[in-house]
Amino acid sequence: MTLRRSTSLGAGKPRRAKPAVAATVGLAVCTLVACGGGGKTQKAATPCPTTGKQVTFPLLDKSKTYTVDVWTNLGSFDIRLDVADSPCTTSSFAALVRKRFFDGTRFHRIVPGFVIQGGDPTATGQGGPGYSVQDVPPSDSRYTKGIVAMAKTAAEPSGTSGSQFFVVTARDAGLPPEYAILGVVTRGLRVVERIGRLGNPVNERPTRQVVVQHMVVTP
């Protein structure tokens, strides 16, 4: 799956997502390939329809703040989930984290000055969990530094997501509002920036192996 670079910058910022500074908080034509710890969640089965394998997962509570802690072999960073704008995307992601789906996966695509992309268990850019969900992002979404969103193929509808995600390392990636907003980096942006420098700008492959050792969702 792919994420297209755009020459336009878009308008506005994702709701509740601010450019990363300390603990707060973005490709010319190219595509981002796309195909959770515990935490108290609502017990009802998810009303989120899935494409592909039919699965259910608990919805995260919109009244709570959820953080995904990402440990890599080069350091750790935190992602605050945007449950309000992306209830299905964040709940699916959290469910995969709880199943340790991401543990041992790699950042298979690193484009210096643009994004780092992971979440593919095959590290080929073609893998995923076998299903997808959809949360159409707000029309004023902007993908600025520290924003975390879900990758998808060009043929898939806006807001489609499986397991592949990308973290923006550009000041503003200039992407259209087609990629479901997972959240924003609130700690460890320097780690993300360090990883972002470890890519070959020609083939977009990592110049050093970057492994996700473990992820956990809190609370």
Image (cartoon, grey):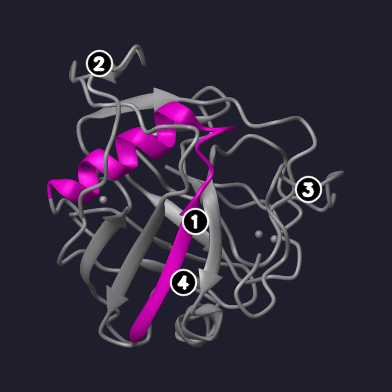
Let me know if residue 155 is in the magenta part.
no
What's the magenta region?
A: 75-99
Amino acid type, mark 3: Lys
Element class at badge 3: loop
Q: Is residue 45 above or below residue 186?
A: above
Q: Nearer the viewer, residue 58 or 27?
A: 58
Q: Nearer the viewer, mark 2 or mark 1?
A: 2
Mark 2, residue position: 44
Residues under labels 4 and 1: Cα distance?
22 Å
**Rendered-image quadrant of the N terminus:** top left
Residues under labels 3 and 2: Cα distance?
32 Å
Residues under labels 2 and 1: Cα distance?
23 Å
Query: Which of the two discs, 4 and 2, labels the residue nearer the N terminus?
Result: 2
Q: Is residue 44 above or below residue 93?
A: above
Residue drawn at (37%, 33%) of the image: 60
Residue drawn at (35%, 86%) of the image: 75
List x then y, in percent, for residue 169.
61, 71
Label 2 neighbour load within 10 Å: few <14, some 14-19, many 20+: few
Instruction: Give left or right: position of 109 versus 7.
Output: left
Name the quadrant containing residue 158: top right
Mark 4, residue position: 110
Amino acid type, mark 2: Ala
Q: Is residue 60 above or below residue 55?
A: below
Instruction: Give left or right: position of 193 versus 178.
Output: left
Mark 3, residue position: 13
> Disc 2, disc 1: CB below 8 Å?
no
Q: Nearer the viewer, mark 4 or mark 2?
A: 2
Q: Nearer the viewer, mark 1 or mark 3?
A: 1
Residues under labels 4 and 3: Cα distance?
23 Å
List x then y, in percent, for residue 13.
78, 48
